[in-house]
Image: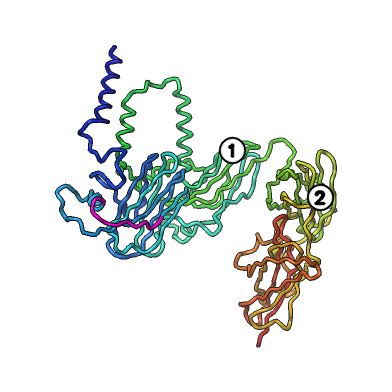
Amino acid sequence: MMAAMALSWYLCLAVTLLCGPSWPQGHSALAPENEVPLRPTAWLPDGKVTSIHLPKGRTRRLYFTLKKVVMMSVTVSPCDLPIEWTLAARTLKDKPPKNPHWSTKKSMPEVWWRGPGTEDKIHTYTGNAMDTYTGPSYAPASIYILRLRPKDQDTRASVYLHQGSGSSGAFPELPSDPHVHTLGVGMTSVTLSWGPSTSLTRLPHTQRSYDYCVLVNRKHNYRNLCAAREGIRKEREKDKKRQKKDKQSKVTVWPILKNWWWQQWDAETDLRSPAALRDQHDELQCVCKGTESVCTVSELVPDTQYYFDVFLIDRLNGTSAAYTGTFTQTHEEARPAITPLREGELRWVTFRDGGSTSGEFFSFRPRGWQQSGLFTLQSCGSSEKIKVTVSSKGQELSSQAVGEDLAQIWLQGSPSYLIHLEREGTAPPRQAALGVLKASVKMQASSAYHRQGVPSLPSTLQIKSFNRLRSCESITLAWMGTEERSLYCVYRRRLGKGEGEKGGTAPCMGPESRSDTERVLCKYFQELNPRRAVTTAVIGGLEPGVAYMFDVYLMRRWGIPIKYSSKTVKTRKEC
């Protein structure tokens, strides 16, 4: 009887709060957007990272003003879910009263809302990636309005306002290659590496305020540190719910009223400072933490796929930057080492000197119903050959010896293939020359859609230069192509005084091993008549009387790039 009376009292309280005349009309969920109630308003501070909660189905607003016409930038970083945010400038026709009796300094934006004026939308974005608007301030603007709204459910976002030109320095800078690379994979450990950040390297050792944080999980990669933190928090909540499943309390009216109460407000007080963000960073269980750009993750489970993420944390500003994560699968335990080849994966295989003669085993599954694929490989040692054997369901399909010339093996008719590589002969290992990569075999397997056979190769891999077209600043090269439309990229390297003009770049040194500064140009070419499949390129911007080594690569959709023979050309000294 007492429980029923208590429940009736809570229901009466709910009806009174929902329908009572004492509640201001401005708080109604049906109020139009331009009717903003008078309440403390959220101002966006300049030069500080602000974390804000975004309730589902509601628009959060942040306001700021600029004292003068300057360059500004607004950065919004969603946490783990997509959001929609817009930046607008509102201009008043008439200036608001300086001291209205019903207003305070914090509620001044509401005065601007109610006054006559115009509003111009400056920028809008929808997604879950960090986005930045940069541009000059809106000259006639009285106030800037930043609106944020979640697309699906409750989430969080970080906002940063910067006034002035140039970089704000609030967020760590990533290197030109932000990918996390896998150096080694074992049964219970994985070694990772990544490029160092310029934010960390340009600071003296006594002023280091950055840390790398490496996180590992079995589900997926995270786009940013906030998403990783939310994922960890949700997993912990699931564990707690499982433990307290039998101890759940009865549902009362008060939690419903409490949620409804806070939904009537924009919750402007939920703006977190960088100090609070730094505390959350400290709670993360990083596998590796510090300034080293190499990390070995141990105590993993064999034959299990793991996802690795690297975050650079700025402890001073409470911000972070996320590298592009990677994933890999640990090796099987006490089983034959058969490594699966991923689609289009470029792989290097090194054979041990004096080791086992059984070689290396790989498996490949072509995609698509046609079950067609192309397997290309090339030996990287001039004194030895590699024997490759392709089989399916215990039946040998192809077997051949592969040297420095590119080999192409057409795969067709089977859902999976077993590839066996072994050394042929016992030639002593050659001394590694300049530019020769430390690998014995370079290979790639790719699914080939809508093809009937092996792609055609150029009739010759020689590059020709024209003496008459050679000047002090440019040279002209020509090479043979194919009847298929392909991409050809030209690389150059300036030869020093001590380097000879003979020889060339190692055949295995592909475009992935070359610097972007060495790439001169890339062009598409196609000629249906193989005898006339000749293309030319004029290379300019050279120095007089200097020798250059040129390399041309044929880039195709399937297989590893084909390298032409290196060509050394010296520009004219006098013109």
Answer above or below: position of 445 versus 18: below
Task: Look at the image and tell me whether residue 316 can be seen.
Answer: no
Residue nearest the observer in this picture, 393 or 209: 393
Mark 2 secondary-structure assignment: strand
Tell me, for residue 299, which label it has, or none: 1
Q: Quadrant of the C terminus?
A: bottom right
Residue nearest the observer in this picture, 202 or 32: 32
Q: Residues within 10 Å of mark 2 (few under 14, many from 20)?
A: many
Mark 1 secondary-structure assignment: loop
Q: Residue at x 68, y 73 (%)?
A: 537
From the viewer's perspective, tell me whether residue 175 is left or right of residue 374.
left
Q: Position of residue 263 (x, y in %)?
A: 32, 37
Tell me, for residue 388, which label it has, or none: 2
Which quadrant holds residue 31?
top left
Number of marks in picture: 2
Q: CA distance from mark 2 to mark 1?
A: 35 Å
Which quadrant holds residue 429?
bottom right
From the viewer's perspective, tell me whether residue 23 is left or right of residue 436.
left
